[in-house]
Image (spheres, helix red, strand yellow):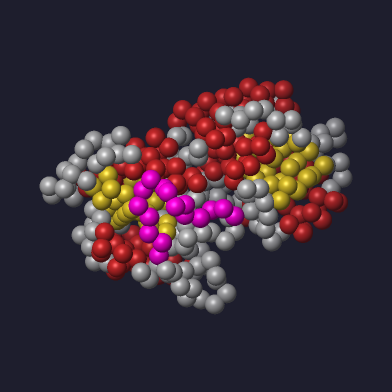
Amino acid sequence: MPRMLTVKGNRRLRVAVVLPGWSPMRDLLFRQMACCPDIRLRVFFEKASIPDRPGWQVPGDTGYETVILNSITPIKGLPDKGLPLTLPGALRQFRPHAVVVTNLTEAVFVMAAALDTRLILWTGETRHILSQRAWPGLSRAIRPVILPRIHAMACYTRRTLAYLEKTCGVDRQTLFTVPQCVDNSFFSNKAEGKKTADFLAVGRLVPAKGLRRLIRALEALPGGQQPSLTIAGSGPLEKELRAMAKAAAGVRIVFAGQVPYERLPEVYRESRALVFPTLNDNWGFVVNEAMASGLPVLCSVFAGASQLVGEGQNGLLCNPMDEVRFVQSVSAMLDLRDRWPIMGANGQRRVCRDYTAKASAKAMLDGILKELSSK
């Protein structure tokens, strides 16, 4: 864990993190951070649960302090977007030495608290910083005002770091990367299941996940390559995707529906490889989950998690925006079918070695302490 830092005679560093909602991946990181005896961690959640993620709600016993904020919906028709109006008061009560936020909207409300604190943006964006994409005009308006007032940025990927430095002009000394992790043991310590599908796709059934392109690519494969696909997830495109799957000649596609988090290891174990054809994902935790489960991965270059993939070692990269090349990538992955077990084992070793909660917590706390030391 990070070195000790004394802050004005108080030997416990107060760290606040602000998030839209709870997730098992973030919970893992926070529990590890809270293990550091020199840290007092308090996580502020804008909502107690996430509507489209069954079971994702703040548990009673987290191992770290939690506060659920009362957010309101400022715009009719956007039930999933709220403003954390109670955040400034809650922060003034805690008096943190550092506050970590995940979007610029949260940053505005942290600034409204008028505290002597260090503000850190935790982001995976490579094209724009504001994750509240419902308000792109607001993003353009507040970005030049807010970014200079952020003291440091914790980046999901090397690509994010390079974008912030070279495109946004952020000082390299204020940037650091934090490995994105899942509970590797939860996915790796499971008995091998009966394989029922060649490919598995996991995620919400929305346009950005690229599943329309995936079904078309499978249908366009050369003769003799007729893989099976399991799609795990739900969303507004389900009816359309089912119709596409029914019409796709020579391809067997099964819809598993929304799978509870506790059953995900079983779903991975019943498949031979993961395909992640996303058109835009800051990270993509399904790649970590699949690798921890011992599966090779065909991963979109538009996913932050693409940095986990070593071409031919634990998977392949693909560009789902280029239909011809995407078909070629799917075909190439199928041609490597005999090597999938070796590729899966390579991926499992990588995430279990480098992308762990311990590594993530150390990187986050080291970055925070470095920023406080420069104060």
Residue in the foreground of this view, choosing between 151 and 30 = 30
| Residue lying farthest to the front in this orientation | 60
Q: Judge whether residue 58 is colored magenta.
A: yes
Q: Quadrant of residue 173?
A: top left
- At x 82%, y 42%, the residue is 252
Left or right, 159 with reference to 306: left
What is the chief secondary structure element of the magenta stretch? loop
**From the viewer's perspective, is residue 143 above or below residue 356?**
below
Indicate the position of residue 54 as horizontal and vertical percent values.
59, 55
- At x 67%, y 58%, the residue is 235
Q: Is residue 291 visible?
A: no
- At x 77%, y 58%, the residue is 240
Indicate the position of residue 212 as horizontal and vertical percent values.
72, 52
Indicate the position of residue 20 as horizontal and vertical percent values.
46, 59
Q: Which residues are magenta?
A: 54-69
Residue in the foreground of this view, choosing between 179 and 302 = 179
Q: Judge whether residue 372 is colored magenta.
A: no
Left or right, 216 with reference to 189: right
